[in-house]
Image: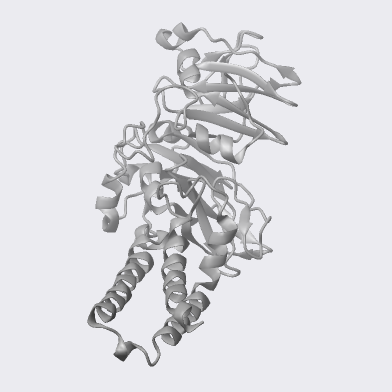
Amino acid sequence: MKRFALPVGLFLLFAAEILRVYFIMPFPGSQQSNTIALAYFLGKYILYIRILALLLIAFGVYRSFLSWKKWKKGLFIFGMLLYAAIFYLVNFKFLADKMFYQPKNKILVSSADNHVSPDKLVIGVTINNESKAYPIEIIGYHHQVQDTIGGTPVIVTYCTVCRTGRVFSPIVNGKKESFRLVGMDHFNAMFEDKTTKSWWRQATGVAIAGPRKGNELKEIPSEQMRLASWLRLNPNSLILQPDPAFTKKYKDLAGFDDGTIKSGLEKRDSASWKFKSWIVGIQHDKTAKAYDWNELLAKKVINDSLPGLPVVIVIEPDNASWHVWNRNINNQSLVFSQDIPIFSRNIEGIIDITTGSTWNFDGLCTNGALKGQRLIPVQASQEFWHSWQTFHPGTQSSK
């Protein structure tokens, strides 16, 4: 038994340390398999695994080390030094929360003091008449920003590898919870709660491992658009500013907004329905549907219906700010014109051909029979096709 203790101990020591990170970070082949249960086990019991492995190693070398030949001693010492190097890299360089940090200075200012370019994409949230905008190229690095809007605690999240922006309530079982970035599963960021060490998926807000497995965070309505469009709708909004402590990190995300970033994990596939093609996804009750971004750019307006929900998807002339609205007004499902030339006739919005009314890009009817009426926003997200398809396996598509 003693002759096997050393190799078994060394294998266990190296394998547990490496696989603990391999399974939850974007290494080649690591994100395609369903290994979350094993990854969680390794993460939870890594200390005990280390102790067991070291005991096996100690048992294997006890009273025999001094009698080894020099090459064998050297090989063993090299192996332990190699483990020390791997231990350092894994625990101080490769873990997610050692690569991506929370803002040290959370600065939110009014538009008068804002330094974020108006053409930057933001995730916007309004609660109790207070509005805040979070630039994607800022929260994309941090992955999450915990804040309070209108007296309500929120956690604003973004995963650049899935191109998913979600806003959740951090209230779990009646108490405010804290979260840290722990890694990713199927290319989507995962957060660990402080209380139970459960792991939560960013794209859905569902706990996928740990004591709270199956629990779900409440999603808070949010919108994605250019900052200029958000301020048009919410002129009194506060805007999150870059934290000076992470200027270099933000620069690494330059080009993410328009999909031209150099990173292969985050760059857009310009063709439709490819792994990293952009889509707009809608989840309503048990039905999920994805709409091709290229089709939206071409048509500008898409009328469609999910069971019990007639929707219209609209993109503004900037080809970046988009909206999804319920097109039912007064128990009547409006049909909006796909007449693209209206954008070149200085009509700030779209026309419904049902009543001939004109609607602006804030969802307000500005002229016609329905003047003064407002369309109700429908929660939707821009996302990579692979992400939406993975986390909405029964999704329909507009192709």
In this rendering, would 353 be left or right of 158? right
Residue at 45% in and 6% down:
341
Residue 151 visible to the viewer: no
The image shows residue 157, relative to residue 323, as above or below, that is below
- The x, y position of residue 69, in whole percent, is 26, 83
Residue at 52% in and 66% down:
42
**Front one among 67 and 164:** 67
- The x, y position of residue 218, in whole percent, is 64, 50
In this rendering, would 141 be left or right of 221? left
- The x, y position of residue 241, in whole percent, is 34, 49
The image shows residue 269, relative to residue 99, as above or below, that is above
Q: Quadrant of residue 333?
A: top right
The image shows residue 27, relative to residue 320, as above or below, that is below
Q: Quadrant of residue 252?
A: top left
Residue at 23% in and 82% down:
70
**Front one among 361 and 243:** 243
